[in-house]
Image (cartoon, rainbow, N blue to C red):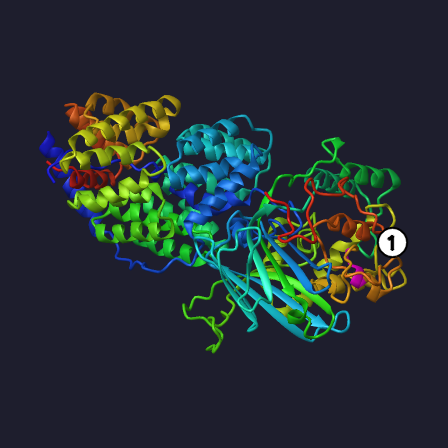
């Protein structure tokens, strides 16, 4: 059964990889933006100045996403849950609910906001975000293409690129991401970093072009060196090719001002394999405690991250299986299916694994292949 | 490496699209809260590019010009140029010379400033005493201070809402675009404006801090064209070329840099937030015009006179009497009633009479030149941090007076100095 699954992974992976395009990446451009250290100081000032005023939630989400600040995420979530009287309130609550992976609730807020006369553009982009996140990108691509045609710019091109990436149109996505970057005319470093990060994620998870992915992550970090997910993902690539020292450096940098569990877990593994066993065990344990704490508050938001942890250094495949199924129920993306298959395999549930593989989308194999590549055996 | 799984989920793959829109949109939550604060999407996104206010006045000894550029952010950008233009001439409206002060910062907040080819300074200017130029012709401070601007934002918004509701319910508008609010409507608009949530007016910007670029400079350096000075501030991006200097310099310091793309400019309070982008303009339209306003060269300023003219009528109507706005010409063709003031305001510079060392009246130079009753002819005019400039300006637009207090506030919570460098209260 294991052999069958692996054969299917390989076959489907080849098909998809053959279809991949070869878009050139324009990277290596020196940031022409305000230094992120300054931008972060100013972001924090804006958050303080806004107090609890409506709208501060989205500033908190920015802090959360770039700096791995889950306290900011928690505050944004709590604030927005108490505000739902106006269209803006509902849109903001939809954003924070999406941020903690409560996609159905977010869609309900968007429907309510639409009923109250929300700007169709706001609804489109927010709904698209949820549909892409839950594996329904193809449903929203026609609307995003129309919107991009009518309103070419950073937001429309970036949104369409993300949807294209989700359905495997990597070359189209990369071209649009590059166009979105060209559309930017701001000294704020964050949006540039995010686009490069999105391109890095796309190339690393949906192709074998890891050098390109790495270059993208490095460019994201050139704009925002404090960008925690970019540091972690770059460290993953470095670690996977056996380059522990730079990986450790990136992770230690990422953990400078937070205790992001993903970074902690990977750092723990690297410590363990570079002779720093006690530190490694400590960080891996810390990651577990941190994940469990986060799962208690936001189970859907961290189910996939935690499942991968338990498949790896967390060494609890049953817990991984529970979390992976929870994640899959919340959003049937190909990646969620792949994760569930991995958890099923790890717990000896080969029938379930095979069933999942047969019944789901064409890109599941890509994600499995991606996982295969990065899991030393 | 022979180890267990290294692949961990990123918390971001489900949120990539949301992250794209959020990366900029999140910063757009506050709009038009101040004098020139938060005026366009570009500067809201990077508050280090956002000038809140400009102040300019002469020193008590009559020897120096004091200048303040307030930036909304807590730290200046290392990728922007902060530029003060001091034009000068003998007659109001006609300047014949110009002095440029250009400052830029590094990540550690050390600054470099050039005053044309006359003087230069490089160093950390964050101590209140500031640092002097190499030729001792100017002193500069750059750091966090209390923001002296005060504004009853909620009351202002509520008053606009009352006016908007009246307009939606059939209040007519005359040929000059002045609404014919009846007495009750007018009373409600003005009363609402003076309150916050029905109670006493409160300052939305209380305790706001801003990055202040404060300069005190010898008058003879800047008054090269005459005693009347016209001041405006701008923010430019750093030019792309790394060696962007205007010319080789034989002086002891590096040559002044060439200016990059302009992204922000301001002088008098409220011009852009209240007039170029009027209170009822659609965001997209208003933002487009304000972005263009910030980027246009000096020779293109007049193109915004029609934008301002279109909005002036609204303010003239708030007291229920159309035609009593400052400089309104009730005998002119209705379409030209507000042209004179619109033309004046589109040339947005703070005028200072440098022959005077007494600075007590906002717009004194303009009042004197235009024969406005009550003008303090011997006053320097300009704008000190203690003027109730925004409310005096509103009064002039509403009923042609300088009584101020339109939003129920008359002064900031903090006392700012006009004599002791760096003038603004400590944060």
Judged from the image, the secondary structure of the residue bearing numbered disc 1 is: loop
Chain letter for mark 1, please. Answer: B
Residue B145's spot in the image, x, y percent? 59, 47
Question: Which of the pair B161/A47 is nearer the observer?
Answer: A47
Residue at 77 percent across and 55 percent down: it is B312
Question: Which of the pair B394/B322 is nearer the observer?
Answer: B394
Q: Where, quadrant-wise, is the C terminus of chain B in this rendering?
A: top right
Residue at 39 percent across and 41 percent down: it is A66
Classify residue B28 by image quadrant: top right
* Residue numbers of the magenta segment: B362-366
Classify residue B305 by image quadrant: bottom right
Classify residue A138 by image quadrant: top left
Question: Which of the pair A334/B105 is nearer the observer?
Answer: B105
Residue at 16 percent across and 37 percent down: it is A375
| Residue B299 seen in the figure | no
Q: Is residue A336 left or right of residue B76?
A: left
Q: Counting other residues with Cα less than 10 Å from the Cα at mark 1, is it few (<14), some (14-19), or many (20 or more)?
A: some
Location of residue A287 with respect to B72 vertically, above or below = above
Q: Is residue A60 left or right of residue A5?
A: right
Q: How many marks?
A: 1
Q: Main secondary structure of the magenta part?
A: helix
Q: Which residue is mark 1?
A: B324
Question: Which of the pair B268/A335 is nearer the observer?
Answer: B268
Residue at 20 percent across and 51 percent down: it is A18
Residue A172's spot in the image, x, y percent? 33, 54
Question: Was residue A238 drawn as part of the magenta stretch in this picture?
Answer: no
Residue A119's spot in the image, x, y percent? 56, 42
| Residue B373 seen in the figure | yes
Location of residue A121 with respect to A26 vertically, above or below = above
Location of residue B367 with respect to A306 vertically, above or below = below
Q: Where, quadrant-wise, is the N terminus of chain B in this rendering?
A: top left
Q: Is residue A349 left or right of residue B399?
A: left
């Amino acid at each position: 059964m294991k052999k069958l699954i692996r054969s299917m992974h390989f076959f489907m992976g080849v098909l998809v990889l053959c279809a991949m395009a070869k878009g050139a990446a324009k990277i290596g451009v020196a940031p022409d933006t305000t230094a992120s250290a300054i931008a972060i100081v100013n972001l924090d000032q804006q958050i303080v100045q806004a107090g609890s005023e409506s709208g501060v939630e989205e500033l908190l989400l920015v802090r959360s996403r770039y700096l791995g600040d889950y306290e900011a995420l928690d505050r944004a979530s709590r604030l927005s849950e108490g505000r739902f009287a106006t269209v803006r309130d509902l849109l903001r609550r939809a954003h924070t609910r999406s941020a903690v992976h409560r996609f159905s609730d977010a869609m309900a807020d968007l429907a309510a906001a639409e009923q109250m006369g929300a700007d169709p553009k706001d609804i489109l982009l927010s709904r698209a975000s949820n549909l892409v996140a839950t594996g329904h990108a193809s449903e929203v691509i026609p609307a995003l293409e129309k919107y991009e045609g009518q309103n070419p710019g950073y937001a429309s091109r970036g949104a369409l690129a993300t949807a294209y990436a989700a359905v495997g149109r990597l070359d189209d996505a990369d071209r649009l991401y590059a166009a979105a970057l060209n559309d930017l005319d701001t000294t704020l470093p964050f949006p540039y970093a995010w686009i490069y990060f999105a391109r890095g994620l796309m190339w690393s998870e949906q192709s074998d072009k890891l050098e390109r992915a790495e270059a993208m992550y490095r460019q994201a970090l050139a704009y925002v060196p404090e960008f925690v997910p970019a540091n972690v993902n770059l460290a993953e690539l470095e670690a996977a090719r056996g380059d522990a020292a730079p990986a450790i450096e990136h992770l230690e940098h990422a953990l400078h001002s937070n205790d992001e569990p993903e970074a902690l877990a990977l750092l723990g593994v690297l410590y363990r394999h570079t002779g720093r066993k006690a530190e490694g065990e400590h960080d891996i344990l810390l990651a577990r405690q941190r994940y469990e704490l986060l799962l208690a508050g936001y189970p859907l938001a961290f189910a996939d991250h935690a499942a991968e942890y338990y498949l790896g250094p967390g060494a609890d495949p049953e817990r991984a299986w529970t979390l992976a199924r929870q994640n899959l129920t919340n959003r049937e993306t190909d990646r969620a299916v792949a994760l569930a298959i991995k958890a099923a395999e790890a717990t000896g549930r080969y029938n379930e694994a095979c069933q999942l593989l047969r019944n789901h989308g064409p890109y599941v194999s890509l994600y499995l292949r991606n996982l295969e590549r990065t899991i030393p055996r | 490496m022979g180890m267990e799984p290294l692949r961990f989920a990123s918390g971001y793959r489900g949120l990539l699209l949301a992250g794209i829109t959020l990366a900029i949109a999140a910063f757009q939550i506050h709009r038009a809260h101040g004098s020139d604060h938060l005026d366009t999407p570009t500067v809201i996104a990077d508050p280090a590019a956002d000038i809140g206010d400009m102040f300019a006045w002469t020193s008590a000894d009559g020897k120096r010009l004091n200048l303040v550029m307030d930036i909304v952010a807590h730290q200046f950008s290392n990728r922007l140029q902060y530029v003060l233009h001091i034009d000068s001439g003998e007659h109001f409206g006609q300047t014949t010379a110009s002095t440029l002060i250009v400052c830029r910062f590094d990540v550690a907040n050390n600054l470099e400033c050039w005053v044309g080819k006359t003087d230069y300074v490089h160093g950390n200017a964050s101590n209140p005493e500031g640092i002097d130029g190499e030729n001792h012709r100017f002193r500069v401070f750059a750091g966090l201070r209390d923001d002296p601007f005060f504004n009853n934002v909620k009351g202002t918004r509520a008053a606009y809402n009352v006016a908007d509701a009246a307009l939606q319910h059939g209040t007519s508008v005359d040929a000059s675009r002045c609404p014919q609010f009846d007495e009750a409507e007018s009373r409600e608009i003005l009363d609402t404006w003076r309150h916050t949530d029905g109670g006493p007016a409160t300052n939305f910007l209380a305790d706001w801090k801003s990055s202040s670029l404060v300069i005190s400079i010898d008058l003879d350096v800047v008054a090269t064209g005459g005693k009347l000075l016209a001041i405006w501030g701008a923010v430019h991006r750093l030019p792309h070329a790394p060696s962007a200097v205007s010319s080789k310099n034989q002086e002891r310091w590096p040559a002044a840099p060439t200016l990059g793309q302009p992204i922000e400019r301001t002088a008098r309070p409220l011009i852009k937030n209240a007039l170029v982008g009027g209170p009822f303009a659609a965001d997209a339209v208003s933002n487009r015009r304000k972005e263009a306003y910030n980027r246009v060269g000096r020779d293109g300023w007049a193109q915004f006179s029609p934008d301002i003219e279109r909005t002036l009528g609204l303010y003239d109507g708030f007291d229920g009497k159309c035609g009593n706005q400052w400089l309104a010409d009730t005998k002119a063709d209705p379409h030209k009633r507000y042209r004179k003031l619109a033309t004046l305001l589109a040339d947005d510079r703070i005028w200072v009479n440098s022959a005077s060392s007494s600075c007590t009246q906002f717009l004194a130079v303009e009042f004197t030149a235009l024969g406005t009753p009550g003008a303090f002819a011997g006053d320097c005019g300009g704008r000190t941090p203690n003027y109730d400039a925004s409310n005096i300006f509103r009064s002039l637009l509403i009923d042609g007076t300088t009584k101020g207090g339109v939003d129920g506030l008359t002064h900031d919570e903090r006392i700012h100095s006009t004599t002791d460098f760096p003038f603004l209260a400590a944060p």
